[in-house]
Amino acid sequence: MKYQLRFGGRQIEFSLPGKAKVLLPQKTKPFSNPEEAIRNMLAKPIGSPPFAELMLTRGKVAIIVNDETRVARTDIFLPLLVNELNRMGVRDQQIFAMISNGTHRAMTKKEIGKKVSAFALERIGVFNHHSKNKDMFYVGKTKKGTEVSYNRRVMEADKIILTGCILYHFFAGYGGGRKGLFPGVAAYESIEQNHLLSLDPRATFGKLKGNPVDDDIQEAVAFRKPDFLLNTILDENKRVVGVVAGEYRKAHEVGCGIVDQAFGSPLPEAADLVIASCGGYPKDINVFQAHKTMENAVRVTKKGGVAIIIAECRDGMGPSTFVNWLKRYDSSQEMKDRLLKKFEFGAHKAFFLSSLTEKADVYLVSSIPEKSLKGLFVKPAASIGEALKKAFEKLGPKPLTYLLPQGGLVFPWVEKERMV
């Protein structure tokens, strides 16, 4: 059987001796007119007055938008939001977009023009959030001890609109929603303190109730509640299949339900071999981001099995802390012990990645030179063919195989094992 998976901006093809079970999103119908769907949601939002009533202001309006690592189709809805604000009497000079980089790198002007929209660059101010900027706005301390500071420009705006895309998140439960504000435009130290909670086993995919990370995020966001939320749900081809808008908690909860229906994939048993693609660029921009797909793949891999991850990683490994921890420690337990003494952002991902490789062999097919991956827990493979050869040598010629073409989008789980 022949299959194709996305690798960066292209497809790679390979064959398997038997038929694999392909885990795809449920059949969804993209909106033929997403702009109309968005306008309808603005007029009849979830749990809040209409956009036109709620956003009237003489002050500044901050629109928080996704960074380079996440697709939301900002290019569709940002012009619409700005034009709607104009129609209400809010001028371009009052409006700005803030890119919710969190701790990620800043976007370039070219990237902003392509992804955020060229329109935005022409009409409104667009700013990168820098989490290590010293001029942050302190808002308070959560019950769990997170000292919360935000981007000052955002905090000084009269109105805050959160935008983004809802999908599964490997320790916050779901992405999108309130995460646009925290960690999106929060201070580096605030994000580190919150991410320490990710070591708790209750912090996991598809879980909000009782998730300590999300509980802390909710409290952090409540210090300066956003005025409105607009989130999309996208299919594997980045087409809009769902839109929610309104009160930032209620609208996000409805969106999470749509994600469960579209992308949840319960399975009767784990597989011997799982082959997963992140879904191409930008989801496979580096190993740090590709880790999300590794989590999804290994979750449904038998102990002692093999997971093959297809990720171009054109930006390399990711943050230096992430790489240094993978080089420095020999086991996940060593990392966890160290993190509990002093948390470091990026190191937590090294801990999670190392934990995965203790359950299964994780082969990474990427553009990173093999020598640069040696000693970093994952097993480098020069090609999908090489990775498959090694998998078959271990598992035999016809292992039970699952294929994840959208490893960062589809959420698979073994029915008897999913945490509730």
Image (cartoon, grey):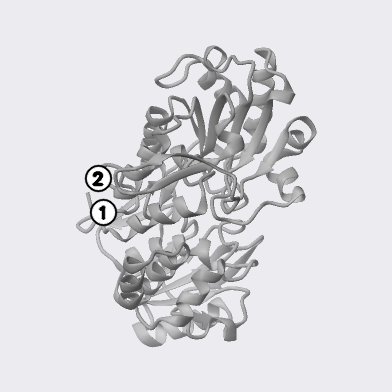
Q: Residues within 10 Å of mark 1 (few under 14, many from 20)?
A: many
Up-down relation of residue 94 to residue 256 (above or below) = above
Residue type, numbered disc 1: Arg
* Residue positioned most to the left: 416
Q: Position of residue 219 (x, y in %)?
A: 35, 38
- Up the image or down, 207 lies above or below 90; here it is below
Q: Quadrant of residue 38?
A: top right
Q: Residues within 10 Å of mark 2 (few under 14, many from 20)?
A: few
- Residue 103, given in percent of the width and then of the height, sits at 54, 55
Please state which amino acid type lies under the numbered disc 2: Gly
Assess whether mark 2 and mark 1 are in contact (beta carbons under 8 angstroms): yes
For the point 62% across and 58% down, the residue is 281
Which numbered tag is attached to residue 153? Answer: none
Q: Residue at x 52, y 81 (%)?
A: 380
The residue lying at 41 percent from left, 42 percent from top is 262
> What label does residue 202 carry, if any?
1
Q: Secondary structure at mark 1?
A: loop
* Position of 126 relative to 9 (above/below): above
Inter-mark Cα distance, 1 to 2: 7 Å
Indicate the position of residue 283 as horizontal and vertical percent values. Answer: 56, 57
Question: Which residue occupies the extreme right position in the image?
Answer: 122
Relative placement, left or right, of 9 versus 21 is right
Question: Which label was assigned to residue 210?
Answer: 2
- Mark 1 and mark 2 lie on one chain; the one further toward the N terminus is 1
Q: Nearer the viewer, residue 130 or 74?
A: 130
Disc 2 secondary structure class: loop
